Image (cartoon, helix red, strand yellow):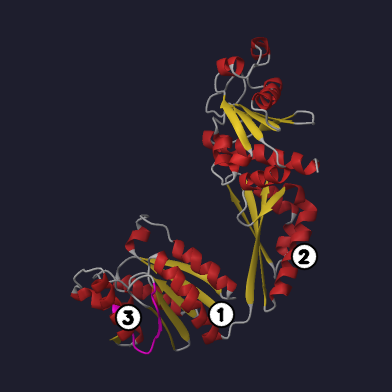
């Protein structure tokens, strides 16, 4: 079963809002075992919407529309679909009563155009709108099912979850499920990761393996399809095991986990605290960590030591060291981590010093970075990195590397 999602609204094409409806519906349809092969966005224009529907009719068994069910003249989805399918628009009395009740309850006059929201395609199954006024609808004509949903996510999402999904299960006797799992990697580039598992990607069928790079990280989305959910999980487990045998050291988490959520969780499990000394990252590491609930159980504090004066006067880095080795150096990173740990009485001190760019510093090119980690009961470790990219990219990746190195040390210390 193949589906196409058509979002209607000029505001989407103008970039005024993001098409989160398509994302939500794709996730929901995948769980039902329905393939989504196309997303289409059309403005509030009847002729262009007609063209989009005619194209969808050639390649989809299910076409889902979001938006264009409201009371104004530019809400034209129902009218366009009715004309294409040769169906009349008729008033759904239950929806009309609900609309009238809303205006009476809010003590507002009901204008004539609001009656338009109660119109449905003749013969369609009605999908109740319990969070707005315009009902959704679904009907099948000439082997193609059309489902019309409102545009506001607060109306569309509960409508589909409660009524739309149930309609599709009944209409298509859906048994097959699609199960997905995302593996998250850091410290390895997309091309290197793909090269390591190239034969697995070439041989993929069920489950499929889809790589995606973003913000210095790489993800692999594994997708399995099977009528038996347990069997789909077994297929995913098998594919994951084959992948991790080769690149497991770079895998830090699953699905919606991030390096920062994972780091916070590991520190909480240990009951350990952390403090940071940040030069080139300017507090970015702690900002990301303290943005998460529960950070107060872990974070002791930190120092943004952007200048040598602060490194010397606040964190006790000797001036001779700064003059001889420089702030961008292994000895400086080591002392920063150790001293901030002692100053904040934390179990872990982490430091970031380096060159974000765009200009060189102390003779070092942009992307030269040192990350120091001083852990209670362990020898201090300093990692030297050579990163590329924009100033923001270098700073962001540096903070993420801090998490990655922390996770490695925490795992090794079990």
Query: As drawn, is 222 to the left or to the right of 286?
Result: right
For residue 304, above or below residue 220: above
Closest to the camera, between mark 2 and mark 3, is 3
Q: Judge the density around disc 3: few (<14), some (14-19), many (≥20) Cα neighbours within 10 Å.
A: many
Q: Earlier in the sequence, mark 3 or mark 1?
A: 1
Callout 1: helix, strand or loop?
loop
Q: Which residues are magenta?
A: 117-130
Callout 2: helix, strand or loop?
helix
Q: Quadrant of the C terminus?
A: top right
Q: Position of residue 57 (x, y in %)?
A: 44, 80
Query: Could you tell me which residue is drawn at 71 percent across and 63 percent down?
Result: 202
Q: Quadrant of residue 223?
A: bottom right
Confirm or deny contact between disc 2 and disc 3 (CB under 8 A).
Answer: no
Q: Position of residue 329 (x, y in %)?
A: 67, 22
The residue wearing badge 3 is: 95
Label 2 to label 3: alpha-carbon separation: 49 Å
Label 3 to label 1: alpha-carbon separation: 31 Å
């Amino acid at each position: 079963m193949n589906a196409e999602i058509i979002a209607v609204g000029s505001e989407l094409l103008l970039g005024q809002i993001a098409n989160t409806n398509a994302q939500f519906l794709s996730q929901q349809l995948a769980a039902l075992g329905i393939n989504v092969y196309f997303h289409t966005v059309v403005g509030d224009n009847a002729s262009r919407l007609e063209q989009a529907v005619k194209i969808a009719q050639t390649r989809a068994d299910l076409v889902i529309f979001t938006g264009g069910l409201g009371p104004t003249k530019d809400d034209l989805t129902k009218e366009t679909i009715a004309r294409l399918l040769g169906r009349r628009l008729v008033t759904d009395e239950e929806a009309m009563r609900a609309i009238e009740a809303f205006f009476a309850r809010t003590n507002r006059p009901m204008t004539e155009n609001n009656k338009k929201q109660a119109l449905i395609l003749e013969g369609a199954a009605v999908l109740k709108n319990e969070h707005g006024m315009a009902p959704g609808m679904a009907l099948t004509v000439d082997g193609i099912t059309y489902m019309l949903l409102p545009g506001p996510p607060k109306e569309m999402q509960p409508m589909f979850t409660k009524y739309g999904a149930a309609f599709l299960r009944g209409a298509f006797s859906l048994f097959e499920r699609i199960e997905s799992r995302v593996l998250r990697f850091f410290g390895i580039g997309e091309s290197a990761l793909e090269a390591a598992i190239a034969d697995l990607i070439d041989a993929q069928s069920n489950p499929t393996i889809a790589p995606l790079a973003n913000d210095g990280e790489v993800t692999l989305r594994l997708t399995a399809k099977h009528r038996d959910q347990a069997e789909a999980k077994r297929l995913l487990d098998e594919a994951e095991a084959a992948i991790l045998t080769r690149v497991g050291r770079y895998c830090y988490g699953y699905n919606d986990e991030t390096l920062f959520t994972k780091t916070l969780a590991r520190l909480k499990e240990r009951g350990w605290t952390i403090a940071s000394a940040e030069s080139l990252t300017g507090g970015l590491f702690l900002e990301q960590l303290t943005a998460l609930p529960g950070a107060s159980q872990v974070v002791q504090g930190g120092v943004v030591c952007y200048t040598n004066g602060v490194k010397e006067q606040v964190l006790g880095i000797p001036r001779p060291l700064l003059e001889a080795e420089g702030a961008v150096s292994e000895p400086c990173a080591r002392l920063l981590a150790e001293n901030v740990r002692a100053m904040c009485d934390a179990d872990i001190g982490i430091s970031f010093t380096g060159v974000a760019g765009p200009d060189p510093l102390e003779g070092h090119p942009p992307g030269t970075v040192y990350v120091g980690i001083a852990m209670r009961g362990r020898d201090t470790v300093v990692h030297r990195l050579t990163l590329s990219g924009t100033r923001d990219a270098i700073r962001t990746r540096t903070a993420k590397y801090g998490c990655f190195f922390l996770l490695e040390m925490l795992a090794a210390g079990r």
